[in-house]
Amino acid sequence: MEVTMTEGIQVQVESFYLDSHSKPEENLYVFAYHISLKNLSKRTVQLMSRHWIITDSSGEINEVKGDGVVGEQPVLEPDEEYEYTSGSHLKSPVGTMHGTYRMTSKDGEEFDVAIPCFTLSVPGKIN
């Protein structure tokens, strides 16, 4: 599990290979990732958007930007936690993801929260 902390917002990520959804013979490797956001600051914040950078082992880089996460823009009061699971696919059995969440505090301040770099890997491909 990978963890970062930015301005009192903790982000934890864990990834999983989805063998039943993958087709290695077609260079399709599907992964899920579970993210936990915890507001350890003293202010109320809202997750407004996300920016992902996804890299596979062939060097192909894809960027994904969009509003919220899984169709939501969650508000986190101090000490509140928000969790979600989403997915991504690669053309190779190993890759990485990292990025940022754009947050807005209750008083209107905008800031970016780092999403830690985590590995997407078919089991046994990395020792």
Image: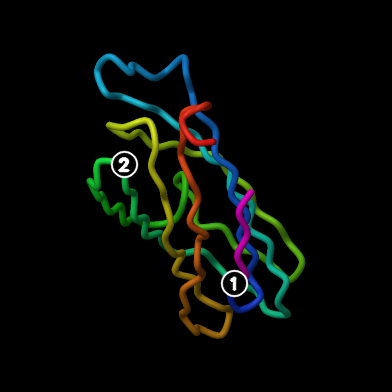
Q: Is residue 109 above or below residue 31?
A: below
Left or right of 20: which side holds 43? right
Residue holding disc 2: 57
Q: Position of residue 14 (x, y in %)?
A: 59, 43
Q: Residue furthest front?
A: 127
Left or right of 10: which side holds 59? left
Magenta residues, as a range? 1-5
Residue holding disc 1: 45
Q: Position of residue 103 (x, y in %)?
A: 50, 71
Tell me the SS state at disc 2. loop
Left or right of 93: which side holds 14? right
Q: Is residue 9 above or below residue 95?
A: below
Residue situated in front as seen by the camera: 52 or 79: 52
Residue appearing at x 62%, y 70% in the figure: 5
Q: Is residue 43 above or below residue 72?
A: below
Coloring scheme used: rainbow
Q: Position of residue 58 (x, y in %)?
A: 25, 41
The amino acid type found where label 2 is placed reads Ser
Kindly report the secondary structure that dominates the magenta region of the rendered protein: strand
Q: Position of residue 42 (x, y in %)?
A: 73, 80
Q: Residue furthest right?
A: 79
Left or right of 36: which side holds 124? left
Please say if the residues under marks 2 and 1 sit with CB atoms less than 8 Å apart. no
Tell me the SS state at disc 1. strand
The amino acid type found where label 1 is placed reads Val
